[in-house]
Amino acid sequence: EIVLTQSPGTLSLSPGERATLSCRASQSVSSSYLAWYQQKPGQAPRLLIYGASSRATGIPDRFSGSGSGTDFTLTISRLEPEDFAVYYCQQYGSSPPPTFGGGTKVEIK
Amino acid sequence: QVQLVQSGAEVKKPGASVKVSCKASGYTFTSYGISWVRQAPGQGLEWMGWISAYNGNTNYAQKLQGRVTMTTDTSTSTAYMELRSLRSDDTAVYYCARDSSSSTGSLGYWGQGTLVTVSS
């Protein structure tokens, strides 16, 4: 199983600031198979990024993904009020099977 | 538009089984796989498994092997997840999710979630 470690656990920022979230894998992940999700309280997760760097349909361009191998990053260039949420990375290869990271909470400072 | 509508909340006793349904609409059901993901209260996301709606092939998380069964009914465009021998730590919101159109395995559409509570 590939273990994904997300850091920091909580990020306290103000609207307009830049957010940088990290996802580190215990073994190499094909960059074609790394996704990021946003989840707000009481809601299902929403796909933001797939293939490490491709934005899903309808996702604003302030969200960007980068990285390869074992180190991946989600960047939110300028935080909007609606961006305060929990973010999860996921590797979704078929073997080893998919796993999620533990999440990073982006909260208002 | 793509929609996944799940069955309602369940309360089960330890040792019982639960079967959650996920009815799909707005796309050709057999063209995409369905994954099941659960989330314990206040915790992160846990991938449970995946089923091909095309041929019924499955891939389950190792920790759930032997307790979980995922099936589909193509006549009603519905996916099912059955979990047996329930324990208190199976209490969670269970989500079904469809592969995105762009990258199989990333989850582009989600159901609303089904709360399963296991309590004596």
Image (tube, coloured by chain):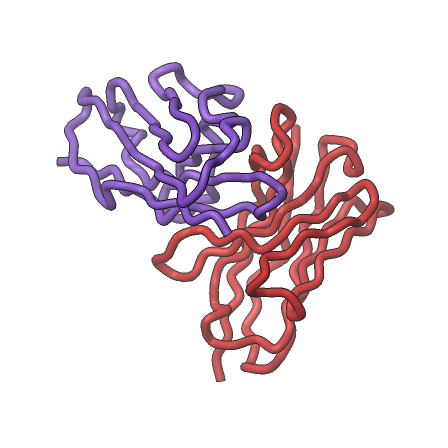
Quarter of the picture containing the C terminus of chain A is top left
**x 45%, y 46%: residue:** A100
Q: Looking at the image, how many numbered discs can be counted on the residues?
A: 0
* Colour seen for chain A: purple
Note whether A89 is above or below B86 in the view shown.
Answer: above
Which is nearer the eye, A10 or B112?
Answer: A10
Q: Which residue is most to the right? A: B75
Q: Residue furthest bottom?
A: B120
The image quarter containing residue A37 is top left
Which residue does the image show at 19% across and 25% down from the upper left? A15
Q: Locate residue B28, reporting x and y percent.
A: 78, 32
Q: Position of residue A78 (x, y in %)?
A: 24, 19
Colour seen for chain B: red
Residue at the spot 50% in from the left edge and 69% down from the top edge: B90
Left or right: residue B66 compared with residue B29: left
In the rendered image, the residue lying farthest to the left is A109
Kindly identify the residue that appears in the image at 35 percent across and 39 percent down.
A24
Residue A90 spot, x, y in % from top left: 47, 40
Displayed quadrant of residue A19 = top left
Q: Is residue A13 left or right of residue B58?
A: left
- In the image, residue A87 sits, relative to residue A50, either above or below, namely below
Q: Is residue B5 above or below residue B65?
A: above
Q: Position of residue B34 (x, y in %)?
A: 67, 44
Depth check: give the residue in front, A47 or A25: A25
On the rendered structure, is A91 left or right of B80? left
